[in-house]
Amino acid sequence: MKQSVLIFAISCLLASCGSNDSADHQHPAAQTSNVNKAVLEADVTDGRQVVVLLADDNMKFNAKEVKVKAGMPVELTLKHTGKAPKVTMGHNVVILRPDVVVSDFVERANAAAATDYIPEELTGQIVVHTRMLGGGESDTRTFTFEKPGTYTFLCTFPGHSMIMKGKFVVE
Ligand code: CU
């Protein structure tokens, strides 16, 4: 009797795991099937490629992939659409050069609390980064990808890049 109740409870958990979006955060294995797969395409205005990334209190970006072109300025805005303060749910966007070992970079970033989790000794590995933002804030950077390639972007607030990570596909 007890066992059947337990099995019922477990199957409920599994069922909700498949449909409840917020449950994904605790299940790295489920990420490939259920994370945001949105692809953003830049809006070209006045010779600039305008890209707006959103981040929220659920530790998510609104896109996993951003498509832009090399050789034309990118105007990248990050908006933190949540309410949580920077100290508990800060978000930034850091775009890394294609040859960077992301896990090594993240390790150094984790230790860089004094500089808002930007490892100053590794700035040569960064194409561009925004400020670390709290809820309601935004920051804009304009830069140019000189070469086509696939560039990882991530949030360097500790723990966030497990989910808050994607790629700029530059053509
Ligand atoms: Cu973050």
Image (spheres, rainbow, N blue to C red):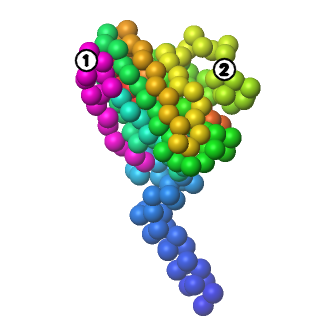
- Percent across and percent down for residue 36 are 40, 46
Q: Nearer the viewer, residue 82 or 33?
A: 82
Real-space CA distance between mark 2 and mark 1, rounded to the nearest whole angstrom: 34 Å
Q: In front of the other: label 2 or label 1?
A: 1
Q: Is residue 146 left or right of residue 137?
A: left
* Numbered mark located on residue 46 in the image: 1
Q: Position of residue 75 (x, y in %)?
A: 38, 22
Q: Quadrant of the N terminus?
A: bottom right
Where residue 42 sits, quadrant-wise, is top left
Looking at the picture, tell me which residue is in the foreground, 120 or 147.
120
Residue 155 visible in the shown view: no
Crowding around mark 2 (Cα neighbors within 10 Å: few <14, some 14 to 19, many 20+) is many
Residue 13 shows in this picture: yes
Residue 74 percent across, percent down from the top left: 36, 19
| Vertical order, 81 against 124 (above or below) | below
* 47 falls in the magenta region: yes
- Identity of the amino acid at label 2? Pro
Q: Is residue 104 magenta?
A: no
- Residue where numbered disc 2 is placed: 119
* The quadrant where residue 7 appears: bottom right
Q: Along the horizontal axis of the image, is 9 left or right of 148?
A: right
